[in-house]
Image: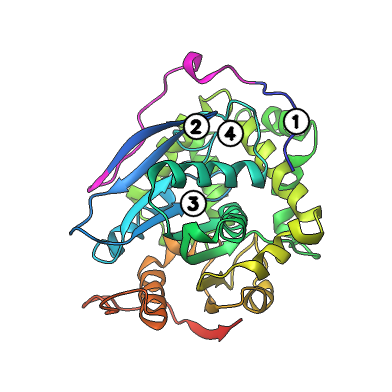
Amino acid sequence: MPSTDPPSVPPANVLPRVAAVKVADGERLRSVHLPGITLTVRSRHPVREGLPPALYVHGLGGSSQNWSALMPLLDGVVHSEALDLPGFGDSPPPDDGDYSITGHARAVIRYLDAAGRGPVHLFANSLGGAVATRVAAVRPDLVRTLTLVSPALPEIRVQRSAVPTGLLALPGVVSLFTRITREWTAEQRVRGVTALCYGDPGRVSPEGFRNAVEEMERRLRLPYFWDAMARSTRGLVNAYTVGGQHGLWRQAERVLAPTLLVYGGRDQLVGYRMAQRAARAFRDSRLLTLPDAGHVAMMEYPETVATAFRELLADTGESAVGERTDGIVDDEPANQTTGG
């Protein structure tokens, strides 16, 4: 459901300049101007011609950087691009202020249509998982396979640890929260986010933590940061209340693409108990459960997720080779079942 609130931030051409976004080795950033939106796209140069395209979609409060650990592990398998959703990462807010699931899905579809890259191997996490589910349901021609890491699909009993995030959708909560946390440093904020999103925060390297602090400092200087967070949270909550053919679970049942579902046993935002329901909803699904992972398995256990994706390709015949890369060893005990 589109947000009915009017945009409350200045247009992109008058936004303040902030620090540059981090770019990992082998990555490049570019801006793509589309009707009503400008998207920043992070990509890796393909190791050879003819590799099938892949697109990665981050979660609430995230950015394309969330995929920087996984993308290089798939360099010989796909041609990777990750986008910053409108209002996140380095993408400015959408002109119409629409941060609904439909609005974000429309941004993904506009990019794929304009780039002519479909069908793609579509990866998504959390909020991005809800967005990607809608994209795959309404535009099956754009999606070759679907890989969802802790997708934010409706839950009747939301975990207690996820409630504070959901409260951002309520009017006035963001203003109250920003006043309460005014004195918090970027480092304190990153420690809180890491504790919430990782099964084991100790897996974050010192360099990774420093980069996250720098990125948090950059985002806090953006005048639309909290607005994008609040409106996207509201859009997700609104999507949870929609029934009928537009409901997310009903749309999951309509997805035709072979689907890999990844759930973490220590996820504090998306219930681990939802894994089996998701495996039943997506008609052609494989389920990878990581008992020690949190909400961002592609960042905690990228090798394991990469291996599972390669196996999905081999299983579905999507890969001409279907091989596992030599030297990749699972660093996390995993339970893998087939559902759907």
Per the image, the residue denoted by label 1 is 176
The tag earlier along the polypeptide, 1 or 3, is: 3
Q: Residue furthest top?
A: 14
Residue at the image position 23 percent from the left and 60 percent from the top: 50
Residue at the image position 47 percent from the left and 16 percent from the top: 13
Label 1, label 3: how many angstroms apart (C-alpha)? 29 Å
Per the image, the residue denoted by label 4 is 184
Q: Are marks 1 and 2 in contact (CB under 8 Å)?
A: no
Label 3, label 4: how many angstroms apart (C-alpha)? 29 Å
Q: Quadrant of residue 256?
A: bottom right
Label 2's element? helix
Label 3's element? strand
Amino acid identity at mark 2: Arg
**x, y (%) of residue 259?**
52, 72
Is residue 269 left or right of 120 when viewed as pictured? Answer: right
Per the image, the residue denoted by label 2 is 219
Image height of 127 relative to 316, above or below: above
Label 2, label 4: how many angstroms apart (C-alpha)? 14 Å
> In the image, which residues are magenta?
9-27
